[in-house]
Structure formats: structure tokens, C-alpha cells
Image (cartoon, rainbow, N blue to C red):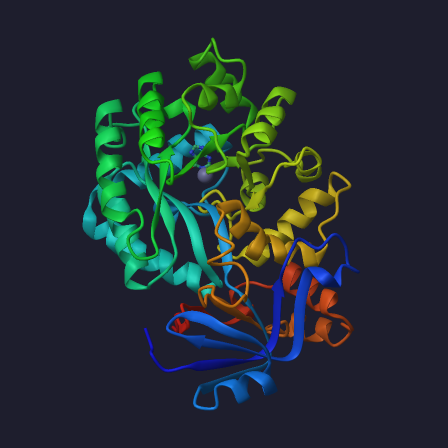
Amino acid sequence: MSAVAKILRGRTLSFHAEPTGPEDTAAYSYREDGAILIREGRITAHGAYSDIVREAPEAEVVDHRPHLLMPGFIDLHLHFPQVQVVASWGEQLLDWLNTYTFPAEVQFADPAHAERMARGFFDLILGHGTTTAVAFCSVHPTSADAYFAEAARRNMRMIGGKVMMDRNAPEGLTDTAQRGYDETKALIERWHGKGRGSYAISPRFAITSTPAQLEAAGALVAEHPDAYVQTHLSENRDEIDFTLSLYPDAPDYLGIYERYGLVSDKTLLGHAIHLEPREIELLTATGGKPVFCPTSNLFLGSGLFDDAGLRANGILNGIATDIGAGTSYSMLQTLNEGYKILQLQNQKLHPLRAFHWITRGNAEVLGQVDQIGTLDVGTEADIVVLNAKATPAMALRAEAATSLSQELFILQMLGDDRAVAETYVAGEAMKPRS
Ligand code: GUN
Ligand code: ZN
């Protein structure tokens, strides 16, 4: 980490709260000639360039004008061992898992394969402006080791865990209740709270865990209350029917996780599309966090996430790519498809709320707003530099944009990795160059 002070100059945008609408200017700070002062990986000042440069005349200045500087994007749900599963044709969830996904994950028993895929995975997310992500690794501890080691090498604030799965999966892709417990425990000791890493206890979903394994996962949660929990919930109708047939005494799908002590405000629940009223009440009561995965839900034909319905019940939602059922590493493209899913339900996603969601909003879901997701003083200098004129189509469209909201909407609908001019991790420029 550089000890030299650095100033990033450009147009700066950071949120203080979720904007209630386009007129809610109190929810964010936007500066036409802004600057961020970085010392030892943290933001030590953020304001008008003229003020910041006076405060630190010795600092190196990196001039990103006319681009937009924002907090790095946060992706709350994706699968590191699925980088070679993206764009696999023709199936819905359960057949997609059996046909494409499980065979790809088996290969992560090989540490050399896991390490090579980890390098590719981190290059990709950084290339798309994502500086924090929450990932499922494969069942093999080697995959979690490769993931956390690569994150540490790049000094990134990453969360993840090996999936626990002890049934309904091929040989080579299962642990047992005891082994899943032991391996998870060892990984928590190895990686949780090391550098910028945090562990997520990761029972994959109820279909691939016996009751004994979910009980073991619950024991881990009780023993490590500061670790996250991640799993999948109510993504697909056939999945729900199969799940309930495996747990016939459960009141509903979420009731299975509830019974084993897996649902709290540190629990991230991928998809959460087809929910019963009792499950919604339980999410409100526990603070469990649904995570919307738009490109995946469209790709697998899973269904339409009811953002407004959940929010009306006081439930805080995250948003994520869900690589490799998701089809883009870009949180911008994720917002694009999310916008359309909400349109199909006559719900609106204003660009100010959208950019809050993939920065401060997802940080709030993680309970980490004091570290990431804003340009606030004292937080870690994870920053993305965005160019709303990155492609010919964007440049031509941007000529007719007359407001910040319009520029953001162009990025939201047309942007991808080409719109990411640079990605900073703890103050260091980290976008891979080919
Ligand atoms: N449910 C259980 N595992 C998975 C997975 O890998 N991807 C998706 N989309 N859903 C799942
Ligand atoms: Zn998933």
C-alpha cells in the first residue's frame, strides 16, 4: 500500500441514504470538480478539488476528468467456480445444475485449476468495477483457499465460503455433515477477519443438504455469530416442490433454514422470488436479506423478483450478478435487466436509487457502510471511475443528456466493463489491462 498521499480528481458522486426520488438531493453529494484524498488505502478527505489540493499540496494528483468517481460496486451473490458455466444453453435451474454446473465445480478439487480460475475471476470482477463480492466457492476447501488467497493478494474486501452439500450431487462434489462442519470451521479460522476477508457459512440450498448438515451449519452459526450466512431460497417452482418433499414437516422453504438457526440479519438469501406470506413476515422479523439476481432470473426463466412488495414490508434487499447463471459480471448490466424485471411488474428503478443500490445499498445489506460503499472520510478507498461515453452508442446518446440522472441511466442501461475507466482497491489502480 502506497504511503504517498494521492488525490483522485473528477466528478464525484456518493450517497448518504437511499434517494426517495429524483428530487431527493439530500440523499447524495455530487461535485462537478471534486476530489478524493487517499492516504494508506483510506479516504481522508472528499470535497471540492480546490479545497482538497490546498489541504494536501504534496499529494500526487490523478486527473480523471471528465469521468465520474463513485464507490466501487458491490456484488452480493455469485459463484466463483462457475466462470466456465456462464452461457450454458437450454435448461432451467435443477437441470442446469446437474447438466452444466456440478460437472464444472468438480474440477475445483484440483488446486491448480482453482488458482487459475481465481485469477480469471478477480480480473473479471475488477475489470467490471466490482471491488467487493460475496461468492460461493465449490465444496472443496482448496477452492475457498484459492479464492481468499487471490483476494488477499489484491487486498480486496471479499466475502465467501465453501458450499456445504452432502446429497443430491455427484460423487466428488459432496462432503458429509461432519466433514462440512470441520472444513468450514478450519476455513473460518484461516480466513475470517484476515486482512479484508470475511467468511460466509454456505449451505448451498436445502436440496443438497441433509437435515444433519443444516444442523451442523446452524452449530457453526452459533459458534461464529459474526460470520455471514449465504444460501438460496425459492428461486424456481420445481426447486420449491423438491425442497418441501425433502422436508415434509417444514411450514415452507424459509422455515427449513429457520428451524436450523440459519436466518438472521447476517443471512443473504439468493433469489427469494416465490415467497409465501409467512416467509415474508419472517424476513421482516429476522432481518434476513433477499438478494435480487436479475440476469440469472431471466436466463434460467426463474421468475420476477418483487422488490416493491418486499420493501413495503420493511425488508432490505441486495442486488447481484449470480455468475454463472447470471450472464454478465457487470453490476451496470445487472441494473439494466433489473430495471426491465421491475417494469414487467409496473415497478420503477430510478437511476439514483439504482446506483445507491450497487454501492451504499449493498454495503448496508452487509452492515459495512462504515467501511465501503461511500466516499465518506474514514472508509476504504475502493473507487470506480465511470465513462458514460465509452462506446459510440453511449457517446451519441450522451450528447442529448442534460442531467446527472440521465447520465446515470445511460450507464445503467448501456454500460459494462467498457464504461469502467479504472477501478481502485484501497487507493491502488487495479483494473487489469489486456
Ligand atoms: N441453487 C443452488 N445452487 C445454485 C447455483 O449454483 N446457482 C443458482 N442460480 N441457483 C442455485
Ligand atoms: Zn447462486
Is 183 on the left-hand or right-hand side of 285? left
Q: Residue at x 50, y 55 (%)?
A: 74
- Residue 166: image quadrant is top left
Instruction: Report the front residue among 122 and 369.
Output: 369
Query: Residue 298 falls in which quadrant of the image?
Result: top right
Determine whether 371 is above or below 285 in the image: below
Q: From this viewpoint, is residue 84 visible?
A: no
In this view of the protein, can residue 421 be seen by the observer?
yes
Q: Which quarter of the figure is the C terminus placed in?
A: bottom left
Is the residue 51 above or below the residue 433 in the image?
below
Q: Nearer the viewer, residue 69 or 417?
A: 69
Q: Nearer the viewer, residue 303 or 276?
A: 276
Numbered circles on residues, count: 0
Q: Residue at x 46, y 65 (%)?
A: 382
Q: Is residue 82 above or below residue 126?
A: above
Relative image position of residue 203 (x, y in whole percent): 37, 31
User: Can you give x and y, in whole percent of width and height, for residue 205 in the image?
Assistant: 42, 28
Instruction: Give the residue at the far top of this rendering.
Output: 249
**Residue 327 position within the rendered picture, expressed as x and y whole percent measured from the top left:** 51, 49
**Residue lying at 35% horizontally and 17% vertically, measured from the top left:** 211
Q: Residue at x 51, y 53 (%)?
A: 328
144 to the left or right of 392? left
Quadrant field for ligand 1: top left
| 247 with respect to 201 (left or right) | right
